[in-house]
Image (spheres, grey):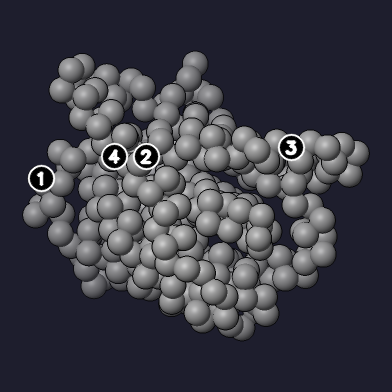
Amino acid sequence: MINKIQKNLSKNMLLYTFSVIIWGLLLWLFFPELKILWKWILIIIFIMIYPTMISISLGQLKKIKWWTKPLLIALFLNFIYAPLFIFALSSIFISDPQITLALMLLAIAPSSSMGLGYIGLAEWNTLVWALILAISFISSIFIYPLAWSYFAGQSHLVIPIWLILKNLIYILIIPLILGITTREYIEKKHEEWTYKKVKPYLSVITLSSLYILIFIIFISKSDLIIKNWKDILAIAPVILIYFTITIFLMIFVNKKIFKLEYGDHQSIIFTSVSKNVAITIAILIAVFWEKWMYMSIVPAIVALFQAPISMLYLRLTKQVKQYFNK
């Protein structure tokens, strides 16, 4: 039963995201007093992030020497290529510096929020996926403050680095420590199969919390969405061009240049090309709170495009696999 719910929440992310956005806009019009839900947002953020961190296993780090090539490719793609490419596209299509900053932060957010739901469909190398996930999240703790400071400067926004660090402790570091501790406890006391049994529940909690979070954002900030609708729509060409070019480029490069196997390639696509909407929304809310809050709408809009693109790519996995097996 839980596996069906998990697959439903993952495969229909476009439908659910669009639905909660529409309901948020409508309820803002008729029941503006529901903005009070905003008071619960930090609790929802923690509930959303913590299960994701349980996916990180320290035991996978011991296998790093066997998977150095796909790991380095994924890290380069996530922390160097993606932000540079998205920044270049944003400079062409987007005039609002706050939206550009939000996209930059999304660009370095590792692993798609719905990645766990794609394991069976994508046929990726789960060991490589777990290793990339662990290293990427741990690296992001150090990269986020530096990246934020630089991107904010480029967007002409003043964000004290202490404010970023303080909120990263709550959004990333504490959930990461608790998540790793929980995972180690499960594996030592109840063995690995127990984690595999609870994994679908973790995915359901994360995705459900994400949809609730998006709903609260839109019911609270619909006035800003309407005011800035032209800038928000400008996100579409940035994301469509980024995903289309990057996916085809990585298929060619991973096959012809890096000589990767199909499973390793899939692990890179779903941890580094697709982006973590949930964590980006959480960090934007924690850092900016009421000021410039409509920035947290940006990742939610991106999810409307990332979900169908991911599903379209999954429909092409048979052809991609044949290409890698030639």
Say if 15 sits above or below 267 in the image.
above
Q: Earlier in the sequence, mark 4 or mark 1?
A: 1
Q: Which residue is mark 2?
A: 175
Which one is closest to the eye, mark 1 or mark 3? Answer: 3
The amino acid on which the numbered mark 3 sits, given as a three-letter code, is Ile
Mark 2 element type: helix
Q: Decide if residue 83 is in sight here.
A: no
The reply to whether discs 4 and 2 touch (Cβ–Cβ < 8 Å) is yes
Q: Earlier in the sequence, mark 1 or mark 3?
A: 3
Mark 1 element type: helix
Q: Which residue is mark 4?
A: 177
Q: Residues within 10 Å of mark 2 (few under 14, many from 20)?
A: many
- Disc 2 from disc 1: Cα separation: 22 Å
- Residue beneath the point at 36% across and 22% down: 198
Q: Earlier in the sequence, mark 2 or mark 3?
A: 3
Which quadrant would residue 29 be assigned to in this image?
Answer: top right
The amino acid on which the numbered mark 1 sits, given as a three-letter code, is Lys
Q: Earlier in the sequence, mark 3 or mark 4?
A: 3
Estimate the x, y position of residue 104 in percent, counting from the top left: 50, 69
Identify which residue, 129 or 25, lies in the foreground.
25
